[in-house]
Amino acid sequence: MNSNPEISFSTRIRKSPFFDSTMKWGCKGFTVYNRMYMPTYYKTFVEDYWSLVNDVTLWDVAGERQVEITGSDAEKFIEYITPRDISKCKIGQCMYILLTEKDGGIVNDPVLLKLNENHFWLSIADSDVLLWCKGIASSMNYNVNIIEPDVSPLALQGPKAPEVMSKIVGTWVKELSFFYFKETTIENIPVVIARSGWSGESGYEIYLRDKLLGNTLWELIMNAGKEYNIAPATPSQINRIESGMLSYGSDMTLNENPFDIGLERLVDLNKQVNFLSKETLNKVNQLGAKKELIGIEIISEPFNEFVADHLILKFNDQEIGKITSSVYSPRLKKNIGLALIDRRSEDINEGYTVNINGSSAKVKICNLPFLRNK
């Protein structure tokens, strides 16, 4: 018997400042992200995807909450919770970092924004970073103030995003370097505009700094984008897998360390200050990681929009790992995905299989990313 599950709205889960606009513009599905409703699709997953790769899309990603860290020990504190060296991060710059526990497990993979000396935001994925940071700061007596500020991001993504953004704030925005930002206003609405976003396309993230003006900002951007065929959309599973972009909770968790998922470039074991996972990650670096993250092609009929992930991956009928994310790519015209497997002693790309709905399908290992435009 088929079921039609629903997600119920209540005051227990927070609504974003853009919630009314997402409903007005036809959002058909939501998930819960950092205890906030986050849209998942408008028309269909595939139609929303084509709007992203061909034109421009506006996403409510307010669920990517900010953890604000200020105080005389703010930079020292962030250096302690990440293995990446942030000492050269400039005011107005973003950095992709990993937050790691004492055992090396990944707590989150936020984007760090440096607003001023000892004033930072962590733009987080879905996990309890605020409470984790508060616990560490309290136990270690850091002189920091850690809060969730009134900041809610929108994402404007797609090849026409620079044209829309330029129309709204001026041509300077096209010169903004990737992973840099500027504090400004849009018709007196206070925002931070960053050249960033969770897609393989051009784009920006617009951090609203007044929750009462969310729907005003949404409508302003949608009106500016009309001539560029703008559409409301959401983070695209299809596009991010094509681009080899990882999703916290799917492709990495507390059970993985940076070396397991190929992000050892975000680990600086020689940075000048101590950090929480230093001893463990030094050992991993010396002994080698036990896992590896790979790109895969699944040889089967095209997947529909709802694919069961975390399927067991086998090599010569022996279980070696799991598929963490998978999807049908309309541009590549094949099923692609990401998988976490036992680290191989040699690169063998054939001989892998997965069971899908009772049938065995061949799996081929591929280089990442599958596609990337920016």
Image (spheres, helix red, strand yellow):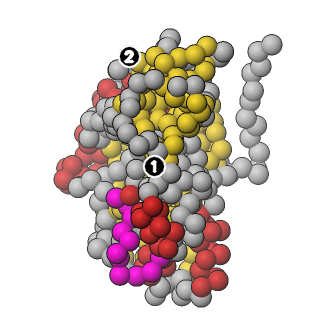
Residue at 31% from the left image edge and 67% from the top image edge: 92
Reading the image, the residue beneath label 2 is 333
Q: Is residue 370 above or below residue 363?
A: below
Q: Quadrant of residue 225?
A: top left
Q: Residues within 10 Å of mark 1 (few under 14, many from 20)?
A: some
Res. 64 visible in picture = no
272 sits to left or right of 354? left
Magenta-drawn segment: 265-275
Query: Which residue is situated farthest in the right direction here?
Result: 1
Mark 1 or mark 2: which comes first in sequence? 1
Res. 137 visible in picture = yes
Q: Position of residue 172 (x, y in %)?
A: 20, 54
Element at label 1 = loop
Return the mark for residue 261. 1
Mark 1 belongs to which amino acid?
A: Ile
Q: Residues within 10 Å of mark 2 (few under 14, many from 20)?
A: few
Residue at 74% from the left image edge and 40% from the top image edge: 9
Q: In which quadrant of the rendered image does the N terminus lie?
A: top right
Q: Position of residue 17 (x, y in %)?
A: 57, 50
245 sits to left or right of 19? left
Residue at 38% from the left image edge and 16% from the top image edge: 333
Which of labels 1 and 2 is toward the front? 1
Element at label 2 = loop
Q: In which quadrant of the rendered image does the C terminus lie?
A: top left
**Of 32 and 239, the residue lying toward us:** 239
